[in-house]
Image: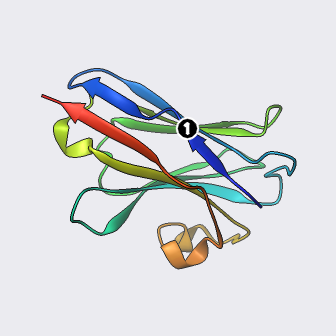
Amino acid sequence: VQLQASGGGLVQAGNSLTLSCTSPGRPFSRYAMGWFRQAPGKEREFVAAITWSSGLPYYGDTPQGRFTISRDSTTNTGYLHVAGLKPEDTGVYFCAATNEYNSLYYSSQASYPYWGQGTQVTVSS
């Protein structure tokens, strides 16, 4: 499974952004998709995951209500919408896919064998 993340860029604090993740040529149907982010000088952290078939979302501790994960199974695209961006949201955002069925493991990077290249989000104050 090859993933492609896009939608990052330079945005002002307070604005919103929607990141996209596609899997060209291969449906996500048996997988869950997750989003992680890595701020400069920090560890990569779990943001959210969504089960592809049912669309159930799971969120990490960081989002605090500003992140919304979704997917469009007709276009094989996953999304991460971030509202009220803050400078501390700056980092590289990665999408990843897993065939793990137990949602207890969705927050672990080790559960995801497939990763996109990441998309840079920079939030200016």
Say whether residue 83 is visible.
Answer: no
Q: Nearer the viewer, residue 123 or 16?
A: 123
User: How far across and how far down the image is residue 121, in percent?
Assistant: 35, 39
Which residue occupies 60% across, 56% down? 116
* In this rendering, position of residue 6 left or right of residue 88: right
- The answer, for residue 27, to whether it is visible in the render is yes
Residue 36 lies left or right of residue 63; in this view the side is right
* Image x and y of residue 105, in percent: 55, 74
Specify whether 65 is left or right of 18: left
Q: Quadrant of residue 110?
A: bottom right
Name the residue carrying label 1.
6
Residue at image position (83%, 52%) is: 29
Q: Amino acid at mark 1?
A: Ser
State the image quarter where residue 2 is shown: bottom right
**Which residue is depicted at the point 84% across and 49% down?**
27
Position above or below: 11 against 53: above
